[in-house]
Amino acid sequence: GQQVMQIPQYQHVQEGEDFTTYCNSSTTLSNIQWYKQRPGGHPVFLIQLVKSGEVKKQKRLTFQFGEAKKNSSLHITATQTTDVGTYFCAGRRYAGYSTLTFGKGTMLLVSP
Amino acid sequence: SAVISQKPSRDICQRGTSLTIQCQVDSQVTMMFWYRQQPGQSLTLIATANQGSEATYESGFVIDKFPISRPNLTFSTLTVSNMSPEDSSIYLCSVGVGSGHINEQFFGPGTRLTVL
């Protein structure tokens, strides 16, 4: 079955440092989504990438989808304490209403 | 967007009993899902709740253990049957919203289940 791997599992940075989490799928994806889960909260949708090589930005967050549509990354510039949480990628193999396969997530801790 | 509520928010249950979790959405949605998230772990899809037909279960999950109801487009229930401590987890209801390529999933607040 489809597998989505995410690294690193955990990262602890100082406020102001950059952070990147990487996601790799065992199969080509139709699209990939990113979610953030704050401690004690539920996952919240951040963004969806659909096109090969796509790059999207949300303020300090930059999302990339690989040319082969099998990998993706999330980069946070100049982290803040509000960025603390677990970031999950989730891949969808087929367009439309097919199910999502979630990566194991990267837990980000930011020290002031 | 979609606003999802779940009941109960948490429960502590005895081994061998069953618990039914309710999920209510503030709008009609086609796609409704049940996930399990064990502490510090990722989300594992249990099943897709289909309105008017039997749920579609993922590998490793069966209807006898996790019966699901979906009587209409705004409501679903998940029952965790004959519970054991291994069933201790957070159970999350999720709905898919959108069309074509864009399908955002919204998650409910979750039900934290502890089985003693």
Image (cartoon, coloured by chain):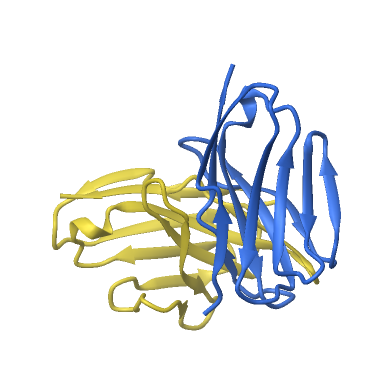
Residue B56 x %, y %: 48, 80
| Closer-to-camera residue (A110/B86) | A110
Specify the quadrant that holds the C terminus of chain A. Answer: top right
Residue at far top of view: A112
Q: Which residue is found at the position 27% from the left and 59% from the top?
A: B87
Question: Eyeballing the image, is A4 above or below B88?
Answer: below
Residue B16 x %, y %: 14, 63
Chain A shade: blue
Q: Which chain is yellow?
A: B
Image position of B18 (left or right of A18): left
Instruction: State how many labels appear.
Output: 0
Question: Eyeballing the image, is A36 above or below A2?
Answer: above
Residue A34 x %, y %: 67, 52
Quadrant hosting residue A4: bottom right
Residue B38 x %, y %: 37, 52
Image position of A15 (left or right of B62): right
| Closer-to-camera residue (B74/A89) | A89
Q: Which residue is found at the position 73% from the left and 75% from the top?
A: A96
| Closer-to-camera residue (A26/B12) | A26
Q: Which residue is found at the position 74% from the left and 27% from the top?
A: A78
| Closer-to-camera residue (B61/A103) | A103
Residue at far bottom of view: B53
Question: Eyeballing the image, is B36 above or below A94?
Answer: above
Q: Which residue is found at the position 42% from the left and 63% from the top?
A: B77
